[in-house]
Amino acid sequence: MSKDQRLRKTFISIWKLVYLAPFSACIAFAMTVCTYLVEGVGIGLLIPLLDTSPDHNAFSDVPLLHAYASFFVQLDITNRVQLVALGMLLIALIRGAFVFGRTVSRRHFEITLMGRLEAMAYEKYQRLCLDYINKKDLATFVNMITSFPPNCAVLAGSVVIAMAAVCCVLLYGAFIFSISWQVSVCAIALIGLMFVAINAMTANRLKRTGECVDRTSVEMNQWAIETARAQPVIRGMGREEVAEHKFNELLGRYMEHAKREAVWRGIVEPSLTTGIMAILAILLYALSLSGTSAETFIPQALLFIMVLSRCLPIASQLNEARGTLTARSYMMSVLLDFLSAEEMPQAPTGVQGLEHFDGCLTFKSVTFWYPDRDRPALDNVSFSVPAHQMTAIVGPSGSGKSTLIKLILRLHDPLSGKIYADDACIEDLLPAAWRSHIAYVPQEPTLFNRSIRDNLLFASPGASEEDIEEACRTAYAKEFIDGLPQGYDTVIGENGVQLSGGQKQRLAIARALIRKPKLLIMDEATSNLDSQSEKFIL
């Protein structure tokens, strides 16, 4: 991708971010512009004090400034100072109000944008094909949902403020241009050269180090997630030091890249300040050689100094936005590509509802082939599951039992053939409508780090206390739950770590039963139960 294409893509990406919260962005933009305009008015208040020439013609070449200064001619110096002091106090109060508005509106914009990006990323994740998710690093998706959106929101906030700062720089430029167009042209040329030089020195390095920081952060998070899940295996094999060494290696790389990024971002600020002060010195020296009288030169020079000094914080904000945009462009690009990508495998969809389901399930000539396999997982399979009966599907490992479950749950759709729920083809049904009639218990239960009650209510939020106890009684789980110190309010830890294998399976079965499904799918869900418990449940 060429430099122009990258620049165009960056601007389009920024526009997409701002467009997600346009109202908040406009308010932040307006508040920033008003803040800088009020500061400009504050500088203008000093003109009556600067124009000390006998006939008050220091700004005679600028009609607006001359008319403003002439208003104070009839006042003595004491009254002039008092009036200017009152004006400065009023300007300070107004500026404070606008600064408050700018700070709050910018933060409001960033929070609004962050929330929308996180919601969009989570929604996108929920609708991806499960096989696609399983083939990717979990940390990639975690960062897409929790880490990238806040950083992109701060980036967008910096850009909005920077756009307002650019508008104010143009206004300040027009102001000094009205005083002396020759000096203004020189100032613009010198400042332009300075920015080009600083950008050439730091832009590529900031982009590379920022991308390395983001990539290493994802790798580090991925390793932390993997080792957190695998703690029993790591400790059982005595590999704690190996895991720590790998994490510390990734952490060291992250810190090294982050420090390099900090160095290159830190270089810009002093370079910018020194450059502007050097330009100011050159301009003052040029003004002194212009042959202008001291009565005119000194007020104009002081006004130039004040205007350019006000440009320093504005230039700093522009630099902050440029540095953030350069360093975080990779993160922004990855997130927006993820949100807008249409070619990613999507979860199956449908259009019809299913108000009634009696429980009969029929496979008719179903064939399914995984994309990365050299033979079909299911080939022309036909059978029926009668309603209100228990049906067992048996077969050796790899014969397609798990694939059947995935097709019933509509995690995939058949390549050929049809699956019918009573008389309705499930491919035509809305996944949510179809899944509302079924419940699934996997061999390895997935439980949440919440209380037992919360885990049960996740399947049916409106279930009553009687429904909870009935489901637990049927799943042979009520006895061990009642024996816990806090009963149903016991927090069971990450994936039910505080429960035994059999207890986790019974809780998972109870969670499925509380839905009162028409079709209950159990994938070896009693493998960890003793024969008495299994007989009681089945």
Image (cartoon, rainbow, N blue to C red):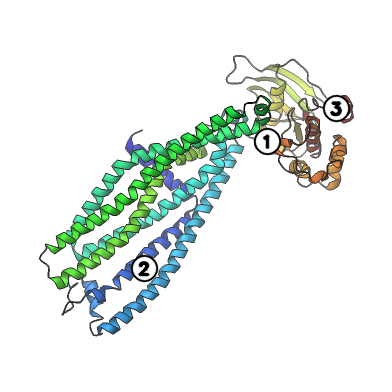
Q: Which of marks 2 and 1 is in front?
A: 2
Q: Residues within 10 Å of mark 2 (few under 14, many from 20)?
A: some
Q: Amino acid type of disc 3?
A: Gln
From where the camera sits, is residue 91 visible?
yes
Q: In which quarter of the image is residue 507?
A: top right
Q: How crowded is mark 1: few (under 14 residues within 10 Å), some or many (20 or more)?
A: many
**x%, y% of residue 55?**
16, 79
Residue at point 26%, 60% (across, down): 173
Q: Which residue lies furthest to the left in this view?
A: 291
Q: Which of marks 3 and 2 is in front?
A: 2
Q: Amino acid type of disc 1?
A: Pro
**x%, y% of residue 280?**
23, 58
In screen coordinates, is 242 left or right of 93? right
Label pair 3/2, CB-CB below 8 angstroms? no
Mark 1, secondary structure of its residue: helix
Q: Is residue 502 above or below residue 82?
A: above
Q: Amino acid type of disc 2?
A: Val
From where the camera sits, is residue 345 visible?
no
Circle 2 is placed at which residue position? 38
The numbered mark at residue 431 is 1
Q: Earlier in the sequence, mark 2 or mark 1?
A: 2
Q: Quadrant of residue 262?
A: top left
Q: Closest to the observer: 536 or 309?
A: 309
State how far apart marks 3 and 2 are (Cα).
79 Å
State how far apart marks 1 and 3 are (Cα).
24 Å
**x%, y% of residue 178?**
21, 65
Residue at point 36%, 63% (across, down): 36
Circle 3 is placed at which residue position? 389
